[in-house]
């Protein structure tokens, strides 16, 4: 288990996901209680990946962002 992880919380462990690279870091962030939308619990989990896998993810994200921007441009209503 990684030094950041808590017992019983496998989401923060690098050792529990089969097929994942060893150079993966998971960052978790909980929104403070007073800042939660509608009082619901909000948690962000960010997985940091480097190397070849990181480049693959960057390319996939770039394609998705481009697709959203193209859609937005086609559906933009002038004010």
Image: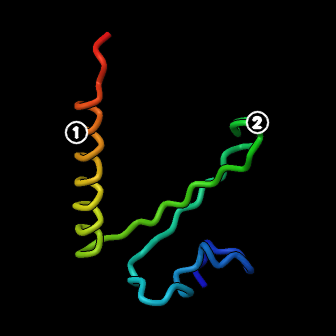
| Of 27 and 11, the residue lying toward us | 11
Residue 26 appears at what percent x and percent y?
51, 68
**Mark nearer the N terminus (2 vs 1):** 2
Q: According to the image, label 2 marks what residue?
A: 34
Q: Is residue 33 above or below residue 43?
A: above
Residue 72 appears at what percent x and percent y?
29, 33
User: Residue 28's quadrant in the figure?
Assistant: bottom right
| Of 8 and 69, the residue lying toward us | 69
Residue at the image point whose x is 38% and y is 83% from the top: 21
Check the image and name the residue furthest to the top. Answer: 79
Residue at the image point whose x is 46% and y is 71% from the top: 25
**Left/right of residue 53 with respect to residue 35 in the rendered view:** left
State the SS at label 1: helix
Q: According to the image, label 1 marks what residue?
A: 70
Characterize the local packing of mark 2: few (<14), some (14-19) or many (20 or more) Cα atoms within 10 angstroms: few
Q: Nearer the viewer, mark 2 or mark 1?
A: 1
State the SS at label 2: helix
Residue 70 appears at what percent x and percent y?
22, 39
Disc on res. 42: none
**Left/right of residue 69 with respect to residue 38 in the rendered view:** left
Q: Is residue 14 above or below residue 63?
A: below
**Left/right of residue 35 with respect to residue 48 in the rendered view:** right
| Of 78 and 28, the residue lying toward us | 78
Q: Is residue 34 above or below residue 44?
A: above
Residue 50 appears at what percent x and percent y?
31, 71
Q: Quadrant of the C terminus?
A: top left
Q: Quadrant of the N terminus?
A: bottom right
Measured Cα–Cα span from mark 2 to mark 1: 36 Å
Residue at the image point whose x is 41% and y is 66% from the top: 48
Q: How many marks?
A: 2
């Amino acid at each position: 288990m990684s030094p950041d992880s808590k017992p019983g919380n496998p989401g923060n462990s690098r050792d529990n996901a089969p097929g994942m690279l060893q150079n993966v870091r998971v960052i978790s962030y909980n929104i403070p209680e007073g800042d939660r939308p509608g009082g619901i619990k909000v948690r962000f989990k960010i997985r940091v990946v480097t190397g070849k896998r990181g480049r693959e993810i960057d390319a996939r994200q770039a394609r998705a962002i481009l697709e959203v921007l193209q859609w937005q441009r086609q559906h933009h209503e002038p004010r």
